[in-house]
Image (cartoon, rainbow, N blue to C red):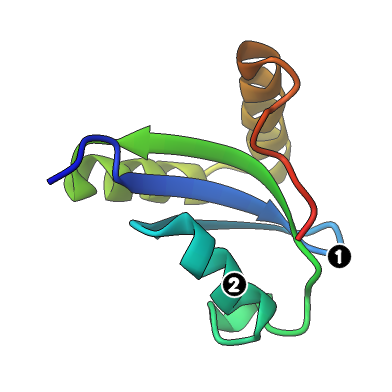
């Protein structure tokens, strides 16, 4: 199994809400969200921008992080996103879908 294949991500929806998810194929998952076949929450809320990505070696680690992020308040999620953007260098991952 390839290292860092398990990904936790945060999307910003067109209504400015944040969605946190897990995948092992980010490109496909983002396509599913755009087509309305991703999570029920994101249906009709596109287009999306990827605000945060974190990669993990194991699914267990990724799911623990996803759960932890989902427990955060909105302002805490925004702080996590901002911290990551500064760390990565204005977030090389952020893109409009």
Residue 5 screen position, x and y as percent: 29, 45
Count the labels in the image: 2
Q: Which residue lies furthest to the right in this view?
A: 15
Residue 66, percent from left and from top: 41, 48
**Of the numbered discs in the image, which one, if any, rests on residue 50?**
none
Q: Looking at the figure, which quarter contains the C terminus?
A: bottom right
Residue 29 placed where, x, y %?
50, 67
- Expressed as whole percent of the image width and height from the top left, the position of residue 3 reads 22, 35
Q: Which residue in the protein does label 2 denote?
A: 31
Horizontal side, residue 69 vs residue 93: left or right: left
**As drawn, 90 above or below 14:** above
Identify the residue at image location x=77%, y=84%.
44
- State if disc 1 and disc 2 touch (CB < 8 Å): no
Q: Residue at x 29, y 36 (%)?
A: 4
Depth check, front residue: 58 or 26: 26
Q: Which residue in the protein does label 1 denote?
A: 14
Give the mark nearest the N terminus, 2 or 1. Answer: 1
Secondary structure category for the residue under label 2: helix
38 up-or-down from 88: above or below:
below
On the question of residue 53 being in view, the answer is yes
Q: What element carries label 1?
A: loop
Taking the spot 49% from the left edge, 43% from the top edge, the residue there is 69
């Amino acid at each position: 199994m390839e290292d860092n294949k398990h990904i936790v991500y945060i999307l910003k929806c067109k209504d400015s809400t944040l969605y946190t998810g897990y995948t092992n194929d980010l490109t496909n998952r983002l396509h599913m969200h755009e087509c309305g076949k991703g999570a029920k929450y994101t249906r009709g809320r596109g287009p999306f921008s990827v605000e945060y990505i974190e990669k993990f070696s194991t699914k267990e680690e990724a799911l623990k992080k996803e759960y932890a992020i989902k427990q955060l308040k909105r302002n805490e999620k925004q702080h996590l996103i901002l911290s990551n953007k500064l760390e990565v260098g204005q977030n090389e991952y952020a893109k409009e879908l």
